[in-house]
């Protein structure tokens, strides 16, 4: 298949850290269509060879096992080209049109790895230049808007130029093999789906924890915060994968219809429930891996009086027959005690105990997203060497552990690699539809409004020491339901 991938922001951070390494890996694996061209777009003047040299230098900085050898890069570089563009100038889009028409590829992908403020401009210019043909697909990176009105405005502007089936709103968490295995676990195995309901599950927690701070992104993070950066998109997409009903098929809209129903079923927020069920925090100075790190307000680009949250924990419920009464806990934050992304399904305790078990012990399924990728199922088992106590046997937790990286090895495909190949092939299953995004923004808007009012009253996020698991209020949040975060067991 002949394809052209036009990478707007082709010299930017996202391009060299994520997109071009992913494209190289697909080239190395033999899954990138051979007759393809990748056109990096940037503001600076540069020849094709200069662009290739720049990308070679950048790829030398990625993880060792993902770095190309000189011979590999020489072959991959033949796919790389460069075009200087001022994204506000129609004449530059005319030059892009000439470049694309000279080759007349089967598929043209416009990847907007730019600031979201440019999405509308670029799409309008593509339409005016006649570049939004039926063979064109456009990829939009998050964040898609700052709130519900801005999200609607961007989507409306993009749909003036492209149809919904041409728009690929990317959330790289959906490309993670472990997230795809979550759907396979639920809908490809008969043993789990009958248990996946309120009668058997006591609670579900979603954790996305980072040890890193905001690094050099302080100015960006000041206008974003953890709720917009992680909860509104990544966390809610994971919640949908856990909570959705079985779709009628693996078709993209069948899956996305079920995810939308989950978002529409989430309990709505009131000012009172935001105060009770949402914890926002901000990291203070502390230590990570034994080294001192500054507090958020001391980071470059951050206001010394910042009220931006770097941590969010919340409790919510899905109001339908399958999940009524089951608490879902979401937690995300920066400068926490570990780097961990996981989903933990806590099953109910046995209805009538005939064995001794540790206090609070029950079956637990942990779906590891990062850095480990796999599943751990905690069961209760009897140790043969253990003596009975008073005629009643004592059980202990025992884990069944499946490491996907060890099981599948070189067959594993990274998130961006999978998503880029899906865009080229036109597969929409792992991308977010406009109505999903809108429903997610509608759900988080009352939290943002409540925090604005709290800021006006002089109430700041709860401080927590860097290197810890967030404010103590996050532990109290789950304790109200008789639960604990996994690391507290």
Image (cartoon, helix red, strand yellow):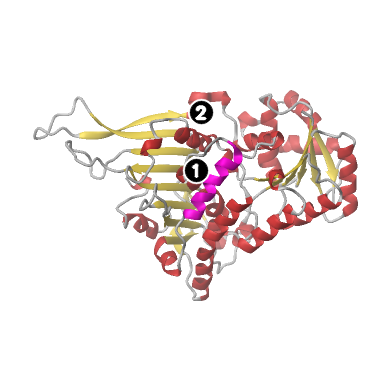
Residue 85 position within the rendered picture, expressed as x and y whole percent measured from the top left = 85, 49
Range shown magenta: 251-265
* Location of residue 271 with respect to 368 vertically, above or below: below
Residue 382 position within the rendered picture, expressed as x and y whole percent measured from the top left = 22, 29
- The residue under the point 39% across, 40% down is 196
Residue farthest left in this picture: 390
Magenta highlight on residue 302:
no
Residue tagged by mark 1? 241
Could you say whether the residue bearing mark 2 is in a helix, strand or loop?
A: helix
402 with respect to 153 (left or right): left
On the question of residue 310 being in view, the answer is yes
- The residue under the point 24% across, 40% down is 350
Residue farthest bottom in this picture: 457
Residue tagged by mark 2? 405
In this rendering, which labeled residue sits more in front, label 2 or label 1?
Answer: 1
Q: Main secondary structure of the magenta part?
A: helix
- The residue under the point 37% across, 45% down is 486
Disc number for residue 347: none
The Cα–Cα distance between marks 2 and 1, rounded to whole angstroms, is: 21 Å
């Amino acid at each position: 298949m002949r394809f052209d991938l036009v990478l707007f922001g082709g010299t930017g951070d996202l391009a060299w850290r994520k997109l071009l390494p992913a494209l190289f890996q697909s080239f190395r694996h033999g899954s990138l269509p051979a007759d393809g061209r990748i056109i990096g777009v940037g503001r600076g003047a540069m020849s094709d060879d200069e662009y290739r040299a720049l990308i070679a230098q950048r790829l030398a900085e990625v993880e060792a096992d993902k770095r190309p050898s000189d011979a590999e890069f020489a072959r991959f570089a033949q796919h790389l080209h460069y075009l200087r563009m001022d994204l506000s100038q129609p004449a530059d889009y005319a030059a892009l049109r000439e470049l694309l028409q000279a080759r007349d590829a089967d598929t043209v992908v416009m990847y907007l790895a730019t600031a979201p403020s440019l999405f509308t401009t670029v799409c309008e210019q593509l339409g005016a230049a006649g570049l939004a043909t039926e063979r064109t697909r456009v990829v939009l990176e998050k964040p898609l808007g700052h709130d519900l009105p801005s999200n609607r405005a961007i989507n409306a502007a993009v749909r003036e130029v492209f149809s919904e089936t041409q728009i690929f709103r990317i959330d790289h968490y959906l490309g993670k093999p472990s997230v795809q295995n979550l759907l396979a676990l639920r809908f490809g195995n008969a043993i789990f789906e009958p248990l996946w309901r309120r009668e058997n599950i006591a609670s579900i927690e979603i954790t996305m924890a980072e040890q890193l701070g905001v690094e050099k992104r302080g100015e960006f993070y000041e206008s974003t915060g953890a709720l917009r950066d992680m909860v509104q998109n990544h966390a809610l997409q994971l919640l949908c994968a856990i909570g959705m009903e079985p779709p009628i098929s693996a078709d993209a809209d069948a899956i996305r219809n079920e995810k939308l129903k989950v978002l529409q079923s989430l309990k709505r927020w009131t000012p009172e429930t935001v105060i009770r069920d949402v914890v926002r925090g901000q990291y203070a100075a502390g230590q990570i891996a034994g080294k001192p790190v500054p507090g958020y307000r001391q980071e470059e680009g951050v206001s010394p009086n910042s009220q931006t949250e770097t941590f969010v924990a919340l409790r919510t419920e899905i109001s339908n027959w399958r999940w009524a009464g089951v608490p879902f806990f979401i937690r995300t934050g920066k400068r926490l005690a570990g780097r961990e992304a996981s989903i933990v399904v806590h099953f109910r305790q046995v209805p009538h105990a005939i064995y001794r078990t540790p206090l609070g012990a029950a079956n637990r399924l942990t779906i590891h997203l990062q850095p480990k990728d796999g599943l751990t199922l905690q069961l209760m088992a009897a140790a043969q060497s253990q003596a009975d106590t008073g005629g009643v046997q004592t059980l202990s937790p025992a884990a069944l552990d499946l490491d996907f990286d060890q099981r599948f090895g070189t067959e594993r495909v990274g998130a961006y690699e999978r998503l880029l190949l899906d865009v080229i092939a036109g597969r929409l299953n792992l991308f977010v539809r406009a109505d999903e995004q809108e429903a997610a923004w509608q759900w988080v808007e009352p939290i943002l409004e409540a925090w604005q009012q709290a800021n006006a009253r002089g109430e700041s996020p709860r401080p927590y020491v860097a290197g810890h698991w967030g404010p103590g209020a996050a532990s109290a949040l789950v304790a109200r339901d008789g639960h604990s975060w996994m690391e507290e067991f």
